[in-house]
Structures are given as C-alpha cells and as structure tokens.
Image (cartoon, rainbow, N blue to C red):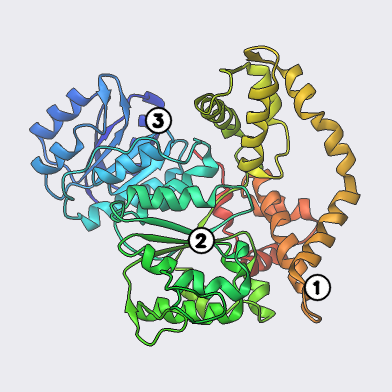
Amino acid sequence: MSGAVLLVEDDPGIATVITAALEDEGFTVDRCDSCAGRDALLKAGSYDALLTDVMLTDGDGLTDLPAIAQRHPGLPVIVLSAQNTLDTAVRASDTGAFEYFPKPFDLDELTRTVVRAVGARPAPRTQPEEPGEGLPLVGRSQAMQGVYRMITRVLRNDLTVLVLGESGTGKELVAEAIHQLGQRKGGPFVAVNAAAIPAELIESELFGHEKGAFTGAIGQAIGKFEQANGGTLFLDEIGDMPMEAQTRLLRALQSGRIRRVGGRHEITTDVRIIAATNRDLAPMIAAGKFREDLFYRLNVVPIDLPPLRERADDIGALARHFLAEAQREGLPRRVLSAPAERALAQREWRGNVRELRNAVFRLALMARDDMIDAESIVDILGDADRARHDKGPVGYERALKEWVAERQVPAGTLYHGALAAFEKPLFEHALAETGGNQLRAAQMLGINRNTLRKKLGELGIEADSFARRA
C-alpha cells in the first residue's frame, strides 16, 4: 500500500509506534503534535488520510475537523482518543470521522483501517451538530468502548438493534442514547416491557384496540406502535413475549403496518425498533419458545452490553454520577474517598449498574459524614468478603437451579441449554485471563487447543477481541 498519512499525536511513544507500523505498510508519514502544526502541514501538502488525537498540546483535535472536511473533501479522518466517553465517540462520528479508536487500541486493527480508509476515500459528511449533553451512559472502560463504537454506527440509519445483556446493565439507556443522538431524536421514544404486561393484553398494548374488541374495551386505545410513530419503539425483555404476539410483531416488522385488536383496517407506521433481552435466545429458539424468523428480524445490529464485573474501572465514575443524581433528588451532598471507591470496585454487583445505583443512593442517605469512607461502605452495605464466602459452591448450584426453573426448560433440551448458558463464560474468562492466548487458555481449561478452537466457533467467541491492546 502507498499513500501519505498525516499523524497528529502529542504522545511521542504512541506516535513512534504508529509511524513504524504505517511505514511497514508502505505509507509515508508526517507527524506533528498540535492543531497549529496540523493546519500548516495540511496547507503545505496533500494527504490520503489524517490520524488525529483529541487532546493536543494547543487544543481539541476535533473542533476544526468540519472546517478541514470542507477544505479537503474526501480526506478520511481517523480519531484516536484517551477520553474514552460516549460523548467523544459521538463527536468523532458527527465530524465525519472514518473510524474512532479509543486508547489503548489494537495496532494491527488501526493499520488495517488506514489501508481501508485510503482505498475508500469516502465523501465528506454534512456540518455536524453540537455534541449532545446529558448522555445517559457513563464509563470509559475498555469493555464499554465496543458499545460506544456500535452506537455511533447506528446513529445515521434506522437499522433494527438488539441489545443483549444481564438485568441491570442499562439496556434501556443504550436505546435512549441511540434515540437521543440519532436521526429520530425529534420523534417520540416509547418503551414497553414485554415481561410486565399480561399475555392476554400485550397485543392490545402494542397495536391498540377498538371499542368492544374484548371485555373491558370501553373505548378505542392507541397502541405503542402508533404512539412511537416517527420515533423509536423500545421493546424490552423481548424474550418474554408470548408466541402469538411474536407472530403479530413479526408481521408488523415485515410490512410496516399494524391492525388494532378488533380493527378492520391496517395502519401504516414509521418506527425504529430497538429490542432488548437478558435471555439467551438460542436455547429458547431450539425449545420452540421464540420464533427464529423474529430473532433474525431483530438481530440486525446486536450490541452486547457488558456486566458491571467486566467494567470495574467504571465503578468510581458511576458512583460519582449517582451521588450527583441523588443530590439533585434532594439527598445530602456526598463525596467518595479514594479507599471508598476501591471498596466499591471490589464488590461483585450481581445486580449490575442498577444495584450499584441503589447502593449509592443508600450511602447518600445513611452516611454519617459528607465524605464517605471505606468503613462506611462496610457499615451500610455489609461485608463484601463475607458475601463472597457465603455464596460458595452452593450459590453457584442455586444459580443453576434458578436458571432451569426460570426458563422451564422442556425435556430433551436441558443439557445443551445449560451448557449454552454456563459454558461460554468459562471460555471468555480463560481468554480474558490469558490476553487471548489460545494455547494458554486451553491449558487453563484443561483441554487441547483444537478442542478450544472448535468450542470458540460453536459459541461464537472471537479470541482476537481478548488480545492485549497496544
């Protein structure tokens, strides 16, 4: 590959590594560490790609990108940033960036992206809007970067999104972020929880009903599809939807038209669908509890939301965010000491972000002093070490029993269903612990490498995603 690349990076070590990698690919690389240096080089020469950090020696590297796009139409821009927030990812997307890489990044992936960008030379985007404030997602951990990048990829289109994650991880917040930052932000955002609606009423809730359609239908009712017209419909806990309702939902998604319960005429609706579930839909499909064709219709763009235990680096920021929220709701102003933040980060949070939020509100209410220390964490929330000890093997056995009871697994599917739910986390843990090294992961699991590769394929696990980042 050949071409000229302008690299704007104020960290000499990172700049040297990137330069060496790109030169090995055949690129010519010019470097600078400031907005002023970038502008001078762009004025003096011609480049096939621009790589820029956000925080430079003399300002914000994103601010002038729209003007650069006007002066240099078609110049692909790749943004690098240690400010790993959703706001940064969205700003990069809004400025027309070809790609966004949070630090630390995968050097090989960055190099491949530069090759692709130089070959593509995409047309410039329109003038961006100001970055949104009050974004609903908090956290800069590596585990959240994939989420942010996926969100930015669906903001300029209406593709159906399926958000997957454990209870309490913030699936509705992801849906709200896509709506608030996307092209339908001027329309309504309507959420419906399939698990909270009785099976006999869910179709009426979604599609509405006419007067007299059933006992108690004393008047016409507008359903969620019509309420969300022109905006976004968030279908939470989609795995709990009854089969008959799934059939009607599939028909509505395929045709873009609905019919109220008891109605004679079809109604055209224009909604973006974002669905979410905390269930593993694969065994449910095998057991005949979820329609396979509906799954494929919903699973256009899957976004996997990590549990809080995989983003422990975010716990301090989340706790501070919730303390500020608690203060806005009338609770006393509190501050966490550094040892208190570490104590929170060491807890398990099996209820994920929702459990953390409730705990922080309890701390704000019950703490004796404005500064919350580590002792207060134990006094108010209990001893985390004791809770882990009490859980023990019996706790895991109980979790398996609860999993079976909750899903009412039919005969003939119990073994494979349980494996699908409990085997994947073991392989992911081994890869995470070994930095994606398949040989060491196989040794940790006590299996040979060929068996590991086969299982990774069956479970849909990408070993490269666990590789140590540069």
Check disc 2 and report its element: helix, strand or loop.
strand
Contact? badges 2 and 3 (CB < 8 Å): no
Please tell me which of labels 2 and 3 falls first in the chain.
3
Check disc 1 and report its element: helix, strand or loop.
helix
Q: Residue at x 56, y 28 (%)?
A: 326
Q: Is residue 196 visible?
A: yes
Q: Amino acid at mark 1?
A: Tyr
Crowding at dot 3, Cα within 10 Å, few <14 / some 14-19 / many 20+, comes out as few
State how far apart marks 2 and 3 are (Cα): 46 Å
State how far apart marks 2 and 1 are (Cα): 33 Å
Nearest to the observer: residue 289 or residue 194: 194
Q: Is residue 218 above or below residue 155?
A: below
State the mark number for residue 14: 3
Q: Is residue 23 visible?
A: no
Please tell me which of labels 2 and 1 falls first in the chain.
2
Check disc 3 and report its element: helix, strand or loop.
helix
Q: Is residue 364 left or right of residue 60?
A: right
Report which residue position mark 2 lands on. 192
Q: Amino acid at mark 2?
A: Val
Measuring from the top left, give residue 262's x and y in whole percent. Answer: 46, 84
Q: Disc 3 or disc 1, which is closer to the eye? A: 1
Nearest to the observer: residue 70 or residue 242: 242
Q: Is residue 291 above or below residue 60?
A: below
> Which residue of the protein is positioned furthest toward the bottom in this rendering?
264
